[in-house]
Amino acid sequence: MIPDLGKYANAVLSSYAVSLGLIIALVVVSFIRARKVRAELEKVEARVKRNG
């Protein structure tokens, strides 16, 4: 099932691992940032509703 990568197996597999790690990191950072932005938006909306 696993293809024979020959002498490049370490380089190819480590590249896949690094790429997957970076993609996961970007997704996590995006979710964290979205939570912060949502919280800030809710604060602004609450302030507008009180003053408006």
Image (spheres, rainbow, N blue to C red):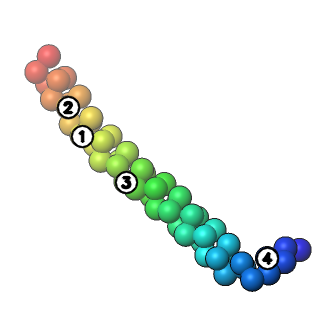
Residue indicated by mark 3: 32
Q: Earlier in the sequence, mark 3 or mark 4?
A: 4
Whole-percent x, y for residue 4 in the image: 84, 78
Q: Residues within 10 Å of mark 3 (few under 14, many from 20)?
A: few
Q: Residue at x 26, y 35 (%)?
A: 42
Residue indicated by mark 4: 5
Instruction: Judge whether 39 appears above or below 21 on screen.
Output: above
Q: Residue at x 19, y 23 (%)?
A: 49
Q: Earlier in the sequence, mark 1 or mark 4?
A: 4
Q: Secondary structure at mark 3?
A: helix
Q: Earlier in the sequence, mark 3 or mark 1?
A: 3
- The CA span between labels 2 and 3 is 19 Å
Residue indicated by mark 2: 44
Instruction: Judge whether 12 appears above or below 36 on screen.
Output: below
Residue indicated by mark 1: 40
Q: Amino acid at mark 3?
A: Ile
- The CA span between labels 1 and 4 is 49 Å
Q: Secondary structure at mark 4?
A: loop
